[in-house]
Amino acid sequence: MNILIIEDEPGIYNFLKAGLEEEGYHITIASDGIQGIEKFHHSTPDLVLLDWMLPGMHGIDVCKEIRKNDRTIPILFLTAKDTVRETIDGLRAGANDYIKKPFSFEELLERIKIHFRNKLEDEILTLGDISLNKSSYQVLYKNEEISFTQKEFALLEFLIRNKGKICTRDEIIDKVWNIKFEYDTGVIDVFMNSLRKKLYMDKENGKIKTVRGVGYIAND
């Protein structure tokens, strides 16, 4: 799971990064609000830890901006503020949770686990007659269960999450294969051919179309 930490105090974000990476999470750091929005769009996080007071852009505004693009990602405020009014403001901006500084790392970790568990239990992605269930690791096509490999499942999930947007080959290699260096993207074709065959698609009429020389796009 990928966590984006938007926090301007190095002592806090380095502490969180070390502890969460030890728990197996992949961490991205942004040290101001504007950079936080940029990294949200480029790192595809599964959860955001968001400071209340940030340079460049207030945490409340960052939260609102994230919610314009993603209605389901868990957002947890980390803040020294603890009045009822501020708590309400944070929740109204779209936050899922609120933890006061200084906090126990163990408490934060448990809250993160709860939000991930709730997110997985509730999350079903759809593309036309295709539904993908994150919690049960199932793909259904017209209510018929289709057996997918782990990488096929991850590829389909990435394309559905980004439906309506062209996903370049470099983005797919980066986000699905987690390869950050130059790599032969021809491997994508092998998995895409298998995925299409299982879902009775072809290049022209299926829900996932090839954008020649660029990548793929999924549309309902």
Image (spheres, helix red, strand yellow):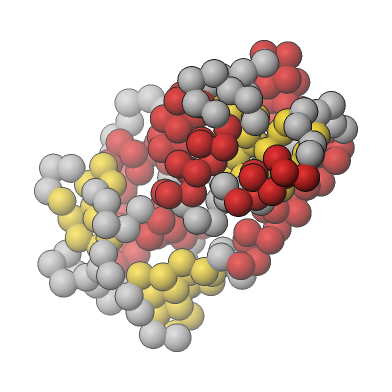
Q: Residue at x 79, y 39 (%)?
A: 83
Point out residue 87 in the picture as x, y percentages from the top left corner: 72, 44
Outermost residue on the bottom side: it is 143
Point out residue 177 in the picture as x, y percentages from the top left corner: 44, 41
Reply above or below: 188 against 15. below
Q: How many marks?
A: 0
Q: Residue at x 34, y 39 (%)?
A: 171
Q: Locate the N terminus and report the quarter of the image it occupies.
A: top right
Outermost residue on the front side: it is 85
Q: Is residue 208 visible?
A: yes
Outermost residue on the top side: it is 10
Q: Residue at x 35, y 79 (%)?
A: 129
Q: Is residue 159 left or right of residue 104?
A: left
Q: Residue at x 62, y 61 (%)?
A: 120
Point out residue 123 in the picture as x, y percentages from the top left corner: 56, 65
Q: Is residue 26 visible?
A: no
Query: Can you tell which quarter of the image residue 159 is in?
Result: bottom left
Q: Is residue 203 left or right of residue 167?
A: left
Reply above or below: 41 against 12. below
Query: Can you tell which quarter of the image residue 143 is in?
Result: bottom left
Q: Locate the C terminus and report the quarter of the image it occupies.
A: bottom left
Q: Is residue 204 left or right of residue 5?
A: left
Given residues 67 and 132, the one toward you in this image is 67
Point out residue 190 in the picture as x, y percentages from the top left corner: 30, 54
Given residues 81 and 28, the one toward you in this image is 81
Q: Is residue 212 left or right of residue 152?
A: left
